[in-house]
Amino acid sequence: MTPTRREFLTRGSTALAGVACAPALRLVSARDHDLVIRGGTVFDGRGGEGIDGIDVAISGGRITAVGPSLAGRGAEEVDARGRAVAPGFIDIHSHGDGTLWDDPRAESLIRQGVTTIVVGQDGSSRAPSPRPASARAIVRGATGVSGRYESMSELFRALGALPPAVNVASMVGLGSVRRLVVGEADRPATSGELSQMRALVDAALADGACGASSGLEYAPGAFASREELAALCRPLAARGLPYATHMRNEDDRLIEAIDESIAIALAARCPLQISHLKTSGPRNWGKIGDALERIEAAKRSGLDVAFDRYPYVAYATGLTNLFPIWALDGGAQRFFARLDAADSAERIRRETLAKVEKLAGWNSIMITGVNDPADRGAEGQRLGDLAARAGLDPYQLTVGLMRRNDADVGTVVFAMSEENLRRFLAHPLGMVCSDGGAFATSGAARQGHPHPRGLGSFARVLGHYVRETKTLTLAQGIRKLTGFPASRVALDDRGRLAAGVAADVVVFDPSTIGDRATFAEPFQYAGGINLVVVNGIVALRDGERGERRSGTPLRASPRN
Ligand SMILES: [Zn+2]
């Protein structure tokens, strides 16, 4: 690729000039750079093809030069010949903060090349939160009440003090805001409550939140009308930050849910990010054409819309998700009371069975995490198999699990189409997320039996979907993990490999990179990653962790 290589020489010349001339003036023992990554195939993160034989120099946490045969020596040098060199991967829809307060190493993320996570998803963020926090974590893997903060700036301060191994950006969760102001009830917000909620959203954005998220299949976020959501999203418009939504429905009413999401973003005049877009349930797989057409039409008419998707055909959610949302109104105790009342019990049962049928049966659902030690044996098992083995009706078994575990049971549900997944990943408006947590094969972050996406998503895209199935080119795949997500959430200093930006870099072998975590054996790290650098500090080199955790809280860049 000679022309592009020449372009690199020209473009890099300003940065190169200083580097090339300086050494002669210095003492022999002085190091010119903190770190130089030599001779790799460099990808810019914006979709550009890789350019061979390029060096990347890093000093003071930033990339200082990119070009062939950079002069000067690094205090540390890495030979990247035959390897891909890319911006660190960015997870635009992550639940990785759930374990950071137990284990800030974020091991499963670093070992995939992830250097930044965007948390506060599905309507649930760690701030704003009442203090002392009493609300249970919505997302499994969250550590009870620790790591919940009154304001986004307090959350960022706490992250800065931790610090984690990865950078953390956060959305403000509209469900968290509703819980704080309206509570758990299924009713419209009063106008006073609405302005209170809007002030909280405003404050979070002013503190550097990178968008607002909703989780419209979860209580209490689901109790918000589209008018309420549009009003709360209005502060996003001036900042150019997205409304990210786990939509109200992802199966039988998928198209209506997409229309609602578009209507909310249009009313608020803000960008729209559809989270983990999918066509759930075999009978809805045929809707993909219609779904993409709606999104493309909105884009053509001027809406700044995009979506993300994790590279697996099973989703993870709470077991509560199997039950009708009205039955969960008011929290777990009200739910159990409704199960005890004859009239509501029968209706809950009927609607739950209908949902299970839609998912193609009880064995579509695997238990991944329980609270009650007596139920540990259920982890990694399918509900149908569990019931058969116990000689129980699967519905009764499921209700028993809910009761014993205080309605806090993690599941993965196999309900998606592989062919559709590839179409979503390859689509120009599609990018990659994990929707997963941060785990470790040992220590405090070895929790439950998680969906493998928290350990494999990014390596899986580059291994399975780029190399093996050729769903994407390597340059496209890298862009969907780096520059594209960074631009969605205004992380202007990330997702690019160029002189002047923050030094988040990953070096990997395109011929071996791949995921190893499976649904049966999730606790296996990805392979094929040679080097991970976070803010200029080596986090991983040839399988060995660096000594320092150098992640930092990331505030969205102001836009106007
Ligand atoms: Zn979600």
Image (cartoon, helix red, strand yellow):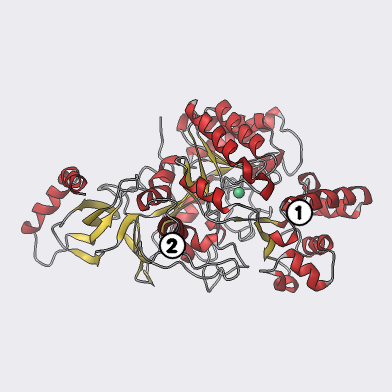
Question: Circle 1 sits in a helix, a strand or a loop, which is it?
Answer: helix
- Residue under label 1, please give it: 356
- Residue under label 2, please give it: 112
At label 1, which amino acid type do we have?
Val
Q: Is residue 51 left or right of residue 492?
A: left
Which of disc 1 and disc 2 is earlier in sequence? 2
Position of residue 128 measured from the top left corner of the image (x, y, whole percent): 59, 45
Foreground mark, 2 or 1, reads: 1
Position of residue 500 measured from the top left corner of the image (x, y, whole percent): 26, 47
| Number of the label disc, if any, that sits on residue 117 | none
Q: Height in image: 293 above or below 493?
A: above
Q: Residue furthest right?
A: 342
**In this view of the protein, which residue sits in the foreground, 497 or 558?**
497
Identify the image quadrant of residue 266.
Answer: top right
Question: Circle 2 sits in a helix, a strand or a loop, which is it?
Answer: loop
Mark 1 residue's CB less than 8 Å from ligand 1: no
At label 2, which amino acid type do we have?
Gln
